[in-house]
């Protein structure tokens, strides 16, 4: 018998009892629908997590100063001044795996515009490279400050969308001035909206200015939330710049003449920063970038032998991997449950096919009597089982897609179409039909024609 004749015979047999065939495939429909829905919801969740972390800057590395140990007492991370803007510049120039690096000086104070005031969640003094690191180069309005503004301590700033809403009531802030610590800053740019990060912090509640301006005109300090225990020990434990960096000299600053010193007496300021943010070129190059930064900073800070690092590097991609792996784990657990329902549906098909063989014993005997061979009977019943499973798979795919759509529309959960899950559902459906339909088909093909004709 040719395949199209076997298929026609199988379809005619299934049409004899449509309701029973539909109930038989119900387990397959539910199992395939569950697989499709779980895979699309899981993929959507993974992509949402990746997008959220990407708003914080793809492949970011955070470099923090080390800590002070004195008389067996640790004063915590950032309690020693070990990072400088020159370290940031060296990382950007000498680390091939790093695409950009920027120094950061943090503070937190009230900003005022007219009769309104606000305390931003984040106030950063940095360089234009920070926008590249955080993937924020595209401005919503205006333009970013430049390296020249950093060198000149220019009183310019960028603001986030939350600042625009709270201080300017949604009006354009470009060209207007805000006041921080009695220093007026001109708003020259508005950052595009990013929303909340994965920790729930508002990334748009931010003011950004040249680090030199923030450090020397606004705060005069480097850390916005100082460690009180450090303050008591700073005089005796904080090394001088010449001690931290043996090659340190004041050549960074122009040497004033005696007349200039008499006219403008000013203390030389050590340009330390709170942290450095850097971005690797790709996720695969993050470990290499960490090794390069570690080697470079140890060399610049003259750390030899067993001397521990006086800095700490944190990798945001580890957070992304952890969050993604958790989502994948939950998706796989739900997928296993869905596959169990497919197995249950396959058992139901085997049961119905065995009943069908019993009911059609005389028909099988008659077919054999007129020339049908055992393989023909085997292919006929196996085709019926596969057709049942494929029909269940098709309806299951439709039900799964509809479920995913309803979850996205009514529950507002992120979903993403998974072509792989759809193909896998069809393959699994056919496999279930073959596996669970083989025994009933084999049993039918082994019937004796005379005994089958005598069957009542």
Image (tube, rainbow, N blue to C red):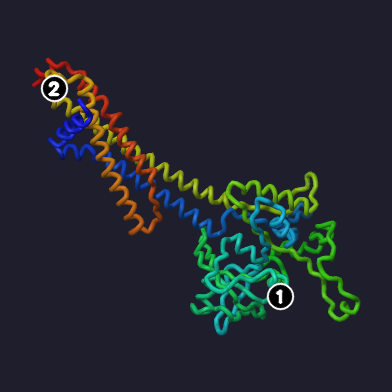
The disc at residue 53 is none
Q: Is residue 46 visible?
A: yes
The disc at residue 217 is 1
Q: Furthest residue to the bottom? A: 115
On the rendered image, what quadrant is the C terminus found in? top left
Q: Residues within 10 Å of mark 1 (few under 14, many from 20)?
A: some
Residue 243: name its quadrant.
bottom right
Disc 2 or disc 1, which is closer to the eye? 2
Q: Is residue 161 above or below residue 24?
A: below
Residue 375 vs residue 404, the one in the foreground: 375
Residue 427 in the image: state x and y as whole percent. 34, 36
Residue 430 in the image: state x and y as whole percent. 30, 34
Q: Furthest residue to the right? A: 258
Q: Which residue is rendered at x = 63% and y = 63% of the image?
A: 130
Q: Is residue 232 above or below residue 177?
A: above
Q: Which residue is mark 2?
A: 367
Give the side of residue 309 with respect to residue 392, left or right. right
The secondary structure type at the circle numbered 2 is: helix
Give the side of residue 210 with respect to residue 162, left or right. right
On the rendered image, what quadrant is the N terminus found in? top left
Q: Which residue is rendered at x = 79% and y = 60% of the image?
A: 238
Residue 298 in the image: state x and y as whole percent. 76, 51
Q: Which residue is rendered at x = 52% and y = 70% of the image?
A: 140
């Amino acid at each position: 018998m040719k395949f199209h004749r076997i298929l026609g015979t199988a379809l005619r047999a299934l049409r004899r009892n449509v309701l029973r065939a539909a109930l038989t495939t119900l387990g397959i429909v539910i199992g395939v629908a569950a697989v499709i829905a779980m895979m699309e919801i899981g993929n959507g969740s993974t992509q949402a997590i990746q997008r959220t972390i990407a708003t914080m800057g793809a492949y970011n590395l955070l470099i923090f100063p080390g800590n002070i140990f004195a008389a067996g007492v640790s004063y915590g991370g950032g309690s020693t001044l070990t990072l400088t803007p020159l370290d940031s510049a060296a990382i950007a120039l000498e680390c091939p795996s790093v695409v950009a690096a920027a120094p950061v000086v943090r503070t937190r104070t009230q900003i005022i515009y007219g009769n309104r005031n606000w305390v931003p969640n984040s106030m950063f003094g940095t360089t234009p490279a920070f926008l590249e690191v955080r993937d924020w180069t595209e401005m919503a309005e205006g333009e970013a400050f430049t390296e020249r503004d950093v060198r000149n301590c220019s009183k310019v700033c960028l603001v986030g969308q939350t600042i625009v809403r709270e201080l300017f009531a949604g009006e354009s802030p470009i060209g207007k001035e805000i006041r921080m610590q009695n220093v007026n800053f001109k708003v020259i740019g508005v950052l595009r909206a990013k929303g909340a990060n994965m920790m729930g912090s508002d990334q748009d509640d931010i003011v950004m200015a040249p680090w030199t301006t923030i450090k020397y005109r606004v705060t005069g300090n480097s850390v916005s939330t100082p460690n009180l225990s450090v303050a008591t020990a700073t005089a005796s434990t904080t090394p001088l710049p010449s001690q931290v960096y043996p090659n340190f000299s004041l050549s960074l600053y122009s040497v004033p003449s005696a007349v200039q010193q008499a006219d403008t007496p000013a203390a030389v300021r050590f340009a330390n920063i709170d942290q450095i943010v850097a971005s690797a070129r790709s996720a695969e190059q993050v470990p290499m970038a960490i090794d390069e930064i570690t080697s470079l900073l140890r060399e610049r800070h003259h750390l030899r032998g067993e001397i521990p690092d006086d800095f700490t590097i944190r990798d945001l991609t580890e957070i992304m991997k952890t969050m993604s792996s958790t989502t994948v784990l939950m998706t796989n657990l739900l997928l296993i449950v869905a596959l169990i329902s497919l197995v249950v549906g396959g058992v139901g098909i085997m049961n119905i096919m065995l009943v069908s063989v019993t009911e059609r014993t005389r028909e099988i005997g008659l077919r054999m009597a007129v020339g049908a061979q055992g393989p023909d009977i085997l292919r006929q019943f196996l085709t019926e089982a596969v057709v049942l499973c494929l029909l269940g798979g098709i309806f299951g795919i439709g039900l799964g897609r509809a479920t995913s759509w309803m979850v996205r529309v009514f529950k507002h959960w992120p979903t993403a179409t998974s072509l792989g899950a759809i193909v896998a559902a069809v393959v699994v459906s056919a496999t279930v039909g073959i596996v669970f339909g083989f025994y009933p088909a084999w049993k039918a093909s082994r019937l004796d024609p005379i005994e089958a004709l005598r069957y009542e």
